[in-house]
Amino acid sequence: MKIKFLVLGLVMCLLVGLTAFAAGPIKVGIVNLPPEESGYRQANVEAMNNVFSKANGYDAKQTNTGDNSEQIAAAKGYIRDGVNYLLISAANASGWDDVLVSAKKAGVKVILFDRAINTDSKNYAAALLSDMAYEGNTAVDWVLKSVPKPINAILIRGQLGSAAEIGRSAALLKAAKEGKLTVVADGTGGDTWSLEEARKVVDAAIAAKKKFNVIYAENDGMAQGAVQALEAAGITHGSKGDVKIIGFDFNRFGLRNVQAGYWDADMQCNPRQAAEISKWIKSGKLPKGIVYQKELLFTTSTITDKDIADWGINADPGKDKITR
């Protein structure tokens, strides 16, 4: 009898193993932004590649482009290829309805990550997002409480029409509409969130003799470019200067700049969605609706080495090291 049960057990194990082998890896198509966009995106792309690997049981491909039409074309291609899951971080929040409906009809489960899309929630299976409105509101709340009155701001936007730009810009523009501050210059780093383009925005404001006391840059690279313009013009900044600086994304170089008082604040945008999404997929249980990640704001007076180690992204230049 014992031998019979032992044989039966071995057969069951063999069948389970063969079933798993026959099922093969989980096919995933990832539509994302290019890593060159920012330090945030570099960390995000790397996490997607590392988590959705063959070693972890996936057959995954990732397309990286900041062009919305190219992203949509890539998504259509993944649907035709018969992926099980389609993960999307959209360059632009609009124009996705047809693709999402096609995916649903084909039985492909769509998971949004990082950025929201303007569509009915029934058009995707799950979403793990950064709450861009929360990021903007938190950053602007800091501006209103920390910058001397009257507040005259330079706004440096990211890619126009992206969920990140919309959420972060809206909060500052709302405060301006309510008379709580004035936006004296409104520019953009362009589709690549460019340091060089951000610097040009501030150069132009200085050349036009605009009076300003805070720069609200929607990522760390653009904050860096903005400060380069101030340095070139001999304008003081940071905790002991005339112009307050706030960036976004939590690159470790930016957090070290905040710690040193070279900048004043940095708002987090957490790029680490891949591991959590993989847990959802492997469990077979996708949460309904939108799940927002916890995100923080650090200032010169609050930030610690542990914060930088625990929450920062990309290389750490080291304590007391300023990145200009």
Image (cartoon, grey):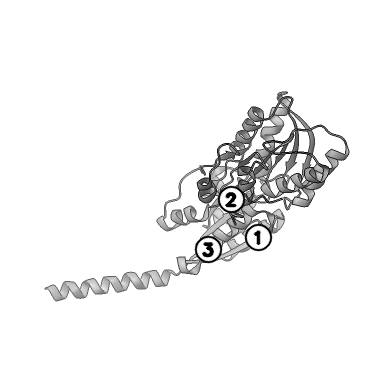
Q: Which mark is residue 319?
A: 2
- Which x, y percent locates residue 211? 81, 32
Amino acid carrying label 1: it is Asn
Q: x, y percentage for residue 253?
A: 63, 51
Report which residue position mark 3 lands on. 50
Residue tagged 1: 64
Q: Is residue 126 visible?
A: no
Which of the two residues, 94 or 67, is positioned nearer the viewer here?
Answer: 67
Q: Secondary structure at mark 1?
A: strand
The answer to which image quadrant residue 39 occupies is: bottom right
The quarter of the picture where the N terminus appears is bottom left
Tell me if 28 is positioned left or right of 221 in this view.
left
> For residue 57, what is the image quadrant?
bottom left
Mark 1 crowdedness (10 Å alpha carbons): few <14, some 14-19, many ≥20 = some
Give the foreground label among 1 and 2: 2
Residue 300's place in the image compared with 176, above or below, is below
Depth check: give the residue in front, 6 or 172. Answer: 172
Q: How many marks?
A: 3
What crowding class fits label 3: few (fewer than 14 Cα within 10 Å), some (14-19), or many (20 or more)? some
Residue at 65% in and 56% down: 33
Q: Position of residue 135 (x, y in %)?
A: 60, 39
Marks 1 and 2 sit apart, C-alpha to C-alpha, by: 33 Å
Q: Is residue 225 visible?
A: yes
Q: Is residue 272 left or right of residue 217?
A: left
* Among the two numbered marks 1 and 3 on one chain, the one whose residue lies closer to the N terminus: 3
Whether residue 95 is situated above or below residue 22 in the rendered picture: above
